[in-house]
Image (cartoon, grey):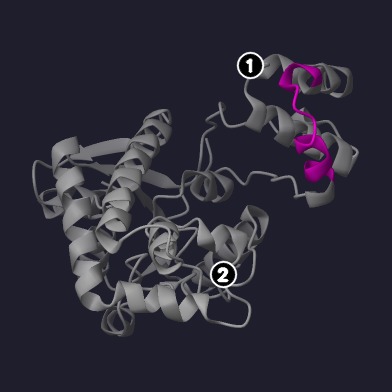
């Protein structure tokens, strides 16, 4: 069993209140700093739509991994992991503790389990996507990496293409990059999750979009889209931003765009919940309405109790 490293991982779905919960915990525990585990809060200027902590909050409690990349750049999971490991090493050196707050499951797992994440090979992927027969691609994968082929459904095109992309691009079997996401080894991190009833999360998602519109979300997206580099492929897919871009580019009205964003975000929250629920190492803390109901439990976990 690894020795506990003193850092707490706090996960939950979008709009579950995990960021506010982490902020309040940090206020009550001197020496605690917050580490964002959100794949979109890394982008500069994408503040309103990603609910990035405010300047006032960041002045009160030190935050990490916010606004570190221009929105026109790609930033891989491997790059994120390396940046996070640098932050954690700095915290350890200074004797500070971190609360890693996030909803991007893969980024959390990459850090918690020190995953070796294969790189991206875009040219290889383009060639593979040109093959319409997913079964033929799976047969090709079986020839290159029978272990990986056995682990996935032959009809799961996304996974088959990704595995082949890595096999061809790296020259290594996809399965050689570790046991995969279905393994949950012992970890030095204490891991907890905040859970709200689905109806409450759904309501909070809709209310958050209303608040973001009032704060100038549409203008934020318009400004980002007008930048010389525009938005990267990844940044364009951020929830809310994709739908507002559809509005700004004349494909729908604003009300339709926001309704679509609410629906997409609720679906995403369900996927997040399924992802996190698979991890048996997480201790879940359930609140009925307000995430602050579980603050004392979070503080106890942070204190090692």
Residue 125 is situated, as x and y percent measured from the top left of the image, at 78, 43
Q: Residue at x 42, y 62 (%)?
A: 241
Asked if disc 1 and disc 2 are in contact, CB closer than 8 Å, the reply is: no
In this image, 110 relative to 176: left or right? left
Residue 22 relative to residue 164: left or right? left
Quadrant housing residue 271:
top left
- Residue position for label 1: 153
- Residue closest to the eye, 149 or 10: 149
Distance between the alpha carbons at the discs numbered 1 and 2: 33 Å
Vertical placement of residue 40 versus 109, above or below: below
Q: Secondary structure at mark 2?
A: loop
Mark closer to the chain start, 1 or 2: 1
Q: Which residue is mark 2?
A: 231
Magenta highlight: main SS:
helix
Q: Nearer the viewer's eye, disc 1 or disc 2?
A: 2
Q: Measuring from the top left, give residue 214's x and y in whole percent.
A: 19, 74
- Residue 197: tell me if it is visible: no
SS at badge 1: loop
Q: Residue at x 52, y 47 (%)?
A: 112
In the image, residue 299 lies at what x, y percent? 22, 55
Magenta stretch: give its range: 124-136
Mark 1 is surrounded, within 10 Å at the Cα level, by few (under 14), some (14 to 19) or many (20 or more) other residues, namely few
Q: Residues within 10 Å of mark 2 (few under 14, many from 20)?
A: many
Q: Is residue 217 something one can see in this rendering?
A: yes
Residue 34 percent coordinates (x, y):
38, 67
Instruction: In the rendered view, tell whether residue 17 sits above or below residue 202.
Output: below
């Amino acid at each position: 069993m690894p020795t506990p490293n003193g850092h707490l991982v706090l996960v939950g779905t979008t709009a579950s209140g995990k960021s506010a919960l982490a902020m309040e915990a940090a206020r009550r525990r001197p020496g605690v700093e917050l580490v964002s585990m959100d794949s979109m809060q890394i982008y500069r200027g994408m503040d309103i739509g990603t609910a990035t902590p405010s300047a006032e909050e960041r002045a009160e409690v030190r935050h990490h991994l916010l606004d570190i990349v221009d929105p026109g750049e790609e930033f891989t999971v491997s790059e994120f992991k390396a940046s996070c490991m640098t932050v954690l090493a700095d915290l350890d050196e200074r004797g500070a503790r971190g609360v890693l707050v996030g909803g991007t499951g893969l980024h959390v797992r990459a850090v918690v389990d020190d995953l070796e994440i294969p790189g991206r090979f875009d040219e290889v992927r383009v060639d593979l996507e040109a093959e319409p027969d997913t079964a033929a691609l799976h047969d090709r994968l079986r020839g290159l990496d029978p272990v990986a082929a056995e682990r996935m459904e032959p009809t799961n095109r996304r996974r088959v293409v990704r595995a082949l992309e890595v096999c061809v691009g790296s020259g290594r079997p996809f399965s050689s990059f570790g046991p995969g996401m279905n393994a949950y080894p012992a970890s030095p991190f204490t891991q907890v999750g905040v859970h709200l009833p689905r109806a409450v999360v759904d309501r909070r998602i809709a209310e958050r979009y209303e608040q973001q519109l009032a704060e100038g979300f549409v203008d934020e997206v318009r400004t980002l889209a007008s930048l010389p580099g525009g938005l990267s492929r990844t940044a364009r897919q951020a929830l809310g931003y994709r739908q507002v871009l559809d509005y700004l580019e004349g494909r729908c009205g604003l009300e339709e765009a926001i309704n679509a964003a609410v629906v997409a975000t609720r679906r995403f929250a369900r996927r997040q919940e399924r992802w996190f629920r698979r991890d048996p190492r997480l201790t879940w803390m359930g609140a009925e309405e307000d995430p602050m109901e579980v603050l004392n439990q979070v503080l106890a976990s942070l204190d090692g109790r």
